[in-house]
Amino acid sequence: MAVYLFDFDGTLVDSTGAVEKALRIAIEKTVPAVIESDLYEDYYKALALFIKGRLTYQYLGVIHELVAQGTIHEYYKLMPRYIKDFPHSRNVVRTLRKRGRYVISFSGEHTYPGGKVIFMKRTNWYDEFDEVITFRGTKDMLKKFENLRELYPDEPFVWVDDSPSRFTYILDENTLLVQKASPYKSDVALLFERQNFLKIKSLREILEIDDGLSACTEG
């Protein structure tokens, strides 16, 4: 049984436009006074950095204000409305499960605790997977990957992600690392030297990869 690990944002769903739209509307609804002022850019940037987990001390005061005004809560309420599936994403996941593959959502947690699961449930993605695993940072990611490998020591893994930098930490030769092409993420040149690395443009290619794995297993 092959085990598939799918990143969520940027791999199965397009959340880039959703982030920008939800940020803007959340600010407009909760702190409308700043829309036409010089403060708008700072408020937008502070909220964007907070969402990405990159907040600096420079914007702490602004974030405290956004928390008090309910802006962050409003953002997380709005965001799922604007997330869009990438072409073929649900069909690929469903087809893999119909074929008897074990499909896991394996992705980084949002700054807001439990935010990733909330988004998945509100976009009706949560039940598409056999299991949902989130992680915080590289160390936690590697630990949870190791836990999965201990549970499935002999099964081939296929990890699909639009962030190839994560793959640089994975030395497991029984894991096929598949980079989903993204205009927002840069390639990692060293990965192209690995025999267990591929880059794809369309998620439909995953089913072709699965066909190849099945042929190898049966052979």
Image (cartoon, rainbow, N blue to C red):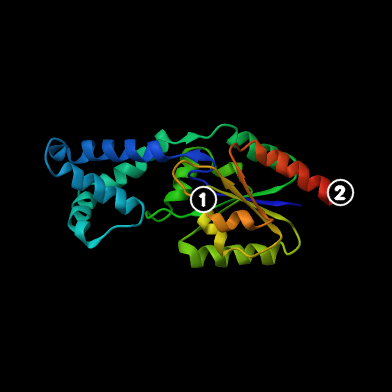
**Residue under the point 11% across and 39% down:** 37
Q: Earlier in the sequence, mark 2 or mark 1?
A: 1
| Mark 1 surroundings: few (<14), some (14-19) or many (≥20) residues within 10 A | some
Residue at mark 2: 218
| Mark 2 surroundings: few (<14), some (14-19) or many (≥20) residues within 10 A | few
Horizontal side of 39 relative to 4 (left or right) equals left
Which mark, residue 111?
none
The quadrant holding residue 172 is: bottom right
The quadrant holding residue 111 is: bottom left
**Residue under the point 38% across and 36% down:** 17
**Residue under the point 14% across and 40% down:** 34
Instruction: Estimate the x, y position of residue 133 in percent, counting from the top left.
Output: 55, 55
Horizontal side of 78 relative to 148 (left or right) equals left
Instruction: Estimate the x, y position of residue 202 in percent, counting from the top left.
Output: 60, 36
Q: CA gap, disc 2 to disc 1?
A: 33 Å
Residue at mark 1: 187
Name the element at disc 1. loop
Figure check: 169 above or below 63? below
Number of numbered discs overlaid on the protein picture = 2
Looking at the picture, tell me which residue is in the foreground, 173 or 95: 173
Nearest to viewer (mark 2 / mark 1): 1
Looking at the picture, tell me which residue is in the foreground, 128 or 2: 2
Which residue is most to the top?
A: 87
Instruction: Estimate the x, y position of residue 50 in percent, counting from the top left.
Output: 31, 53
Name the element at disc 2. helix
Give amino acid for label 1.
Asp
Give amino acid for label 2.
Glu
Looking at the picture, tell me which residue is in the foreground, 131 or 106: 106
Horizontal side of 182 relative to 68 (left or right) equals right
**Residue under the point 53% across and 43% down:** 11
Instruction: Estimate the x, y position of residue 32 in percent, counting from the top left.
Output: 16, 37
